[in-house]
Image (cartoon, rainbow, N blue to C red):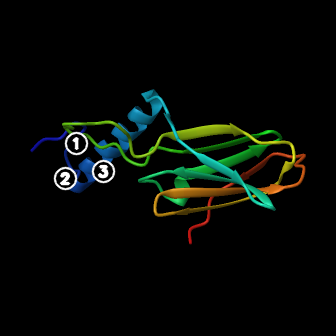
Amino acid sequence: MRLPGYRSGMTTGQSIQKVVVETTAETERTMRTQKVPVNVYETSGALVVIAPLPAVTADDVTIDLRPGTLRFYAHLRSSGPRDYLVHEWEYGGYEREIEVPTSYGAGIEATLMNGQLAIRVLRGEGHEALTTKPNTV
């Protein structure tokens, strides 16, 4: 079998990996990010945001907190060449931005477990931008 991008001297495993990496980069460059649904609620000490992020790892996810705004996104994990019968979502390429009340922003804590991202925006005014990655439990 000859794969797109195959070069002499490469093993089949190397050529398959190269094709997957190239296909993933091209898909991420041209795809529309997937808007993530969220549940948001208040506790006594934080604004809590819960979002589904299937098929990504904590290293793929970035969380940015700016005064008045929380944004999180995950890069595309993998997009190898496949002949889908149904193709309704990608393995990443997620993004969401939500408004944060001014009474929150003192800090952020986040975890990613079983495909669910949980972000706690701590109560108290925030005056500087913060960026973090979620922990895994």
Residue bearing mark 1: 7
Quarter where residue 19 is shown: top left
Q: How far apart are marks 1 and 3 (CA)?
A: 13 Å
Which quarter shows the C terminus? Answer: bottom right
62 relative to 46 in the view: left or right:
left
In the displayed structure image, the side of residue 32 where residue 16 appears, left or right: left
Q: Is mark 2 on a helix, strand or loop?
A: helix
Q: What residue type is labelled 2?
A: Thr
The CA distance from mark 1 to mark 2 is 10 Å
Residue under label 3, please give it: 17
Please report contact status of discs 1 and 3: CB closer than 8 Å, yes or no: no
Q: In which quarter of the image is the N terminus?
A: top left
Residue type highlighted by circle 3: Gln
Please give the count of numbered marks on the rendered protein. Answer: 3
Q: Residue at x 46, y 63 (%)?
A: 114
Q: Distance between the residues labelled 3 and 2?
A: 9 Å
The residue nearer to you, when weighing 93 against 102, is 102
